[in-house]
């Protein structure tokens, strides 16, 4: 028995060391420093070009958006009233984005109260902030608390660095938007607090026009993951 425990301990130690080597290799292979960039009129102009490419004016007039996130969380967002139904598993939170205290929670069709209700509301807010960002991030380039910088890439092209000093669950995050000739996003690189490796890239190429006229992505590629946004519906 003691011998088996020693063998198991050695195996676990070897696996931990292997995992550490893999993580360190990924860090040194992919990690990039946050580019400095320059705040300028040119940066704002590039951001405006991006917004025109995704029909931001139509997005502002959009009143209802429905989507899902990798098939786990499902959303029905009344954008004008800032109300959203957030559903995962047997949990449904009718979330009031501006006044979360008035939100309601049900699990298995039974109303939830007390501390459990507050916990579910907090989860719904975190889900919504993350999952909506993967749907509408380019539309947020001029949100309150954002800074825009122009970055010159090694290939001579310009990229747009958008940093968030406030808002969401992780203020301080930065995203470097890589755009095509029309201003349509192709990908972004991330410097975010929840990921210790800076500069990881995710695609933004699967754009589809909605009923409202605004463009939204249907899926993203991030490392070995497919981030599917489900059947995106949006109307005025």
Image: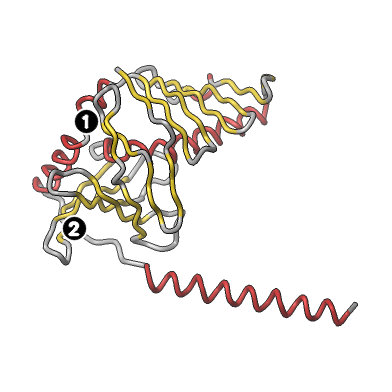
For the N terminus, give its image quadrant: bottom right
**SS of the residue under disc 2:** loop
Query: Which of the pair 202/35 is nearer the observer?
Result: 202
Instruction: Give residue 190's quadrant in the image.
Output: bottom left
All told, the count of numbered labels is 2
Label 2: how many Cα within 10 Å (few below 14, some 14–19, many 20+): some
Label 1: how many Cα within 10 Å (few below 14, some 14–19, many 20+): many
Up the image or down, 10 lies above or below 31; here it is below
Going 47% across and 28% down the picture, which residue do you hit? 75
Scheme of image coloration: secondary structure
Front position among marks 2 and 1? 1
- Residue 193 spot, x, y in % from top left: 43, 54
For this view, does 76 lie left or right of residue 163? right
**What residue sits right under mark 2 in the picture?**
37
- Residue 151 spot, x, y in % from top left: 17, 57
Residue found at the very far right of the displayed protein:
1
Instruction: Give residue 59's quadrant in the image.
Output: top left
Going 49% across and 41% down the picture, which residue do you hit? 70
- Residue 38 spot, x, y in % from top left: 15, 55
For this view, does 140 lie left or right of residue 66? left
For this view, does 213 lie left or right of residue 78? left
Up the image or down, 149 lies above or below 78; here it is below
Up the image or down, 85 lies above or below 165; here it is above
Q: CA distance from mark 2 to mark 1?
A: 24 Å
For the C terminus, give its image quadrant: top left
**What residue sits right under mark 1 in the picture?**
56
**SS of the residue under disc 1:** helix
The mark that comes first in sequence, 2 or 1, is: 2
Assess whether mark 1 and mark 2 are in contact (beta carbons under 8 angstroms): no
- Residue 17 spot, x, y in % from top left: 60, 77
Going 35% across and 53% down the picture, which residue do you hit? 202
């Amino acid at each position: 028995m003691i011998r088996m425990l020693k063998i198991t301990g050695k195996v676990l130690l070897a696996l931990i060391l292997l995992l550490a080597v893999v993580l360190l290799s990924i860090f040194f292979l992919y990690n990039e420093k946050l580019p400095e960039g320059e705040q300028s009129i040119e940066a704002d102009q590039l951001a405006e070009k991006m917004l025109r490419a995704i029909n931001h004016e139509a997005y502002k007039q959009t009143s209802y958006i429905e989507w899902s996130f990798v098939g786990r969380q499902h959303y029905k967002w009344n954008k004008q009233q800032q109300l959203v139904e957030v559903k995962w598993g047997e949990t449904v939170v009718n979330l009031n984005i501006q006044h979360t205290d008035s939100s309601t929670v049900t699990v298995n069709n039974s109303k939830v109260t007390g501390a459990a209700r507050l916990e579910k509301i907090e989860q719904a807010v975190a889900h919504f902030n993350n999952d909506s960002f993967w749907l509408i991030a380019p539309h947020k380039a001029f949100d309150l608390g954002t800074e825009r910088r122009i970055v010159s890439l090694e290939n001579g092209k310009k990229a747009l660095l958008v940093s968030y000093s406030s808002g969401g669950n992780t203020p301080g995050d930065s995203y470097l938007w890589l755009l095509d000739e029309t201003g349509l996003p192709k990908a972004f690189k991330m410097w975010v607090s929840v990921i210790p490796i800076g500069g990881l890239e995710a695609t933004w190429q699967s754009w589809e026009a909605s009923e409202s006229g605004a463009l939204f992505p249907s899926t993203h590629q991030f490392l070995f993951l497919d981030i599917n946004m489900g059947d995106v519906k949006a109307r005025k």
